[in-house]
Image (cartoon, rainbow, N blue to C red):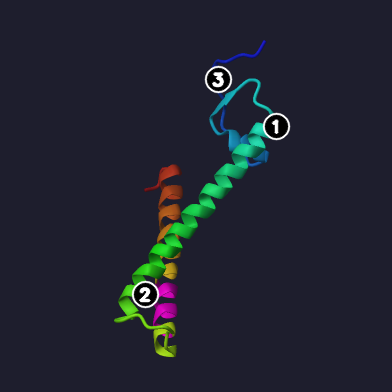
Amino acid sequence: GLKTEVELRRPCTSTCSSNELLGGLLTMDGVSQEDVQRTAGLIQMQQMIQGQKVTMKILGHCFERCIDTPDDQLSYKDQQCIWNCTQRLFDSEQFMVKRLNAAKTRQQQGGM
């Protein structure tokens, strides 16, 4: 029969398969390959949606900052303002992600 107990797995090495990475620390016996692939697809879709939410939040912020009164069309100046604003915010976000990842790596190595 199927075991329903949850077992802890040891952390995988740098040669982990994508299934091992997806499985994380907890796994259950009897999980099919289709379930693993479905879960991977859902995680990827969730990450994409989260990225779109961030993009729309940034765009909305920049639109409010750059556009006083919306009209039928955006002027070149308004388009440039939105473009520059979004680029600055995306660059700042990428900088912060890199910085947080570096701090996390240092902490994991015991050097914080």
Residue lying furthest bottom: 76
Where is mark 3, residue-wise?
Answer: 7
Residue drawn at point x = 43 percent, y = 60 percent: 54
Q: In the image, which residues are magenta?
A: 80-88
**Which label belongs to residue 62?**
none
Q: Amino acid at mark 1?
A: Gln
**Neighbours of disc 3 within 10 Å: few (<14), some (14-19), many (20+):** few
The answer to which of marks 1 and 2 sits earlier in the sequence is 1
Closer to the chain start, of discs 1 and 3, is 3
> Between disc 3 and disc 2, whose residue precedes?
3
Kindly indicate whether the residue at mark 2 contacts the one at mark 1 (C-beta within 8 angstroms). Answer: no
What amino acid type should be assigned to the residue bearing mark 3? Glu
Position in image of residue 48 (x %, y %): 53, 54
Query: Along the horizontal axis of the image, is 32 left or right of 104?
Result: right
Q: Residue 105 or 64: which is nearer the viewer?
A: 64
Q: Which mark is residue 33?
A: 1
Q: Tell me the SS state at disc 2.
A: helix
Residue pictured at 48% horizontal, 57% vertical:
51
- Residue 79 % position (x, y): 44, 83
Dot 2 alpha-carbon crowd within 10 angstroms: few under 14, some 14 to 19, many 20 or more: some
Q: Is residue 78 a member of the stretch shown in magenta? A: no
Task: Verify CB contact (< 8 Å) between mark 1 and mark 3.
Answer: no
Residue under numbered circle 2: 63
Q: Amino acid at mark 2?
A: Phe
Residue 42 drawn at (x, y percent): 57, 43
Q: Quadrant of residue 29?
A: top right
Mark closer to the observer (3, 2): 2
Q: Is residue 86 magenta?
A: yes
How far apart, in angstroms, are the residues tagged by discs 3 and 2? 50 Å
